[in-house]
Structure formats: C-alpha cells, structure tokens
Image (cartoon, rainbow, N blue to C red):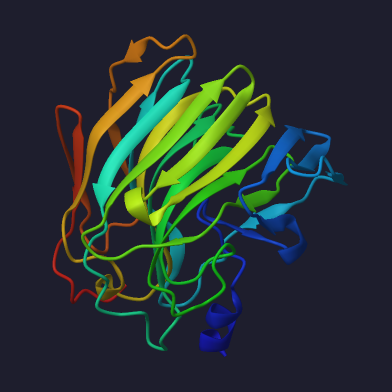
Amino acid sequence: MRFFAAVASATLMPDGRDYDEQCIHRLEEHHTVITTEAGDTLVNTRTGDRVELPPCDSKAASPGVGYYSDWIVDTVSRHPSIGMMATNWTVPTAPESRGPVPGMSSVYLFNGLETGTGHGGTSKGILQPVLSYGKSGCILNPLAGWRFTAFQVTKAGRAYCGKVIEVEEGDTLQGRMTKSGDTWTIEADAGAKGVSSHGVTGEFEATSAYITVEGMIIYNCKALPKDDLLFSANVLSDSQGKALEAQWKTEIYHKECQPAVSVQGDDVTVSWGPADVVV
C-alpha cells in the first residue's frame, strides 16, 4: 500500500508541494499569466483569449515510512530586491535508482527566485527553471529521463509548466529569470535543443535567490545524481539592473546523503557522501 501511494503522487511539484490536478497548467509557448491574490488570468497571446482562474490550495508533500519528498539542500542569497538571476549547469549522469519500484523516485535541480522570506517562510510564489529526472506534476511519465522546463507557482496557488525539453547527460543549460516592468520571464535554455519560456505579469517582488536540489519519494541515496553538481557563473542584479553580490547561505533539510555545498567566486558546487545509504 505504501508503494501504491507513492506512485500515485503524480501532482507533487518542484516547489515541494502537492497540487490538485485542476490547479496544474501544462502550457505551450504562446501563453502568459496575469496573477493576483484574487486569482490568475491565463492569456493566449496568439488569440487574445483569456481564462479567469480562482485561487487554489496546495499542501505540503506528506512524509512516508522510509522515504521523503522535500528540498534536500539549498544555498540562498537574500536581497531587498532582485530583478534577474542566471545560472549555468550541465546535465549530470542519471541516478542509479528510480526507487524500489521503477518510476517512484524523482529529482529536481534548479535555480529559483522567491518572495518574502523565501522557502519555508512568507513566500507567495516561486520562479524556477527546473531540470528534472522522473515524474512531476509537469511531467506525467514516471520513467522520464532528464527534462528541462520553465516553472512557476503564483500567489493564487496555481502551478504553471512551460514547454518540456528533452536533454541528455553532458548538455549545457542555463536557467534565467528576468524582470521587465511588472513582467517576469522564466527561461529554461538548452541551447540548440530549445528554450522553455513562461511569462507572468503581476506583483512578484523577488528577494531570495536559490540553488536547490530536491527529491521526491527518495528511499536511498542512489536516487540522486552521483556526480558533484556545479552551478556556475551565477549572476544576480536588482530591479534597476545593478549587479548584486551573492551572499550564499547553505540550508540542509535532509542529512541522510551527506549533502555539502562549496562556493568559489560565482560558482556553487553541491556534493554527496556514499551512494549506498538507505533513507
């Protein structure tokens, strides 16, 4: 029964929360979102059609016996105002395990921006270019390989997924979030393989910048990438375009796989302990 519950959790999202299926929107490139606390408006930029969407409720992912679904480790830099973040990384070697039953475990690697005091605090939304392995609310195939997607959660509690791009080990990626006026553009750029882009208009005052590794239905450390993860050339600027100096602070949420973060200049590296540890 525990295995069935885990496999059925297909609406777990890269922000670490569980959403009703009706609150997840898998979009093509020609859509944008106007968001308020009273709800969102989904706009088709080709036809001009608008759909009004009421607020949704999400919930924290429920812990299970012998596994967890959560952010594992992050490093965060907080500022009064952030108007742009860009990060480069390379698609790593795939995890050795997908869980006790194939398709159970998933992993998400991303840079991201949040409002308020950030993750676990007063944040009312997140922007994320997400590299994933396995399923999520955005990607329904539990046996999916590496995928790169622009992702967002609004203050109305709705989750939006941009176009899904298939990538492979060794591909070079860049995740970008850029503000122009009151509009944010989230881009998951896989070079020649394409760009997943998603736009949102509305009040989103980014104050927390993240480099994050997250796992869903993690039973042992073989479900995580075994290589060190290098997030390089991190660039931050404020809403006026002035460069910001990152002040990274590491937060570890799950110690089982001995995550560690090192910072050298504009580069952030996440590493692990032995892969044979059982959670």
Q: Tell me residue 129's x, y (percent).
A: 45, 46
Q: Position of residue 94 (x, y in %)?
A: 26, 71
Would residue 97 appear left or right of 155 to someone viewing this image? left
Any part of residue 87 in sight: yes
- Please say whether residue 252 is visible from this viewpoint: no
Residue at the spot 48% in from the left edge and 54% down from the top edge: 149
In terms of image quadrants, where is residue 174?
top left
**Percent position of residue 214, x then y:** 39, 56
Q: Nearer the viewer, residue 146 or 15?
A: 146
Q: Nearer the viewer, residue 126 or 59?
A: 126
| Residue under the point 24% across and 63% down | 257
* Residue 104 rendering spot, x and y as whole percentages: 45, 79
- Image position of 145 (left or right of 80): left
Q: Quadrant of residue 202?
A: top right
Please determine whether, in this image, residue 215 is positioned above or below residue 50. below
The residue that appears at 48% across and 16% down in the rendered structure is: 81
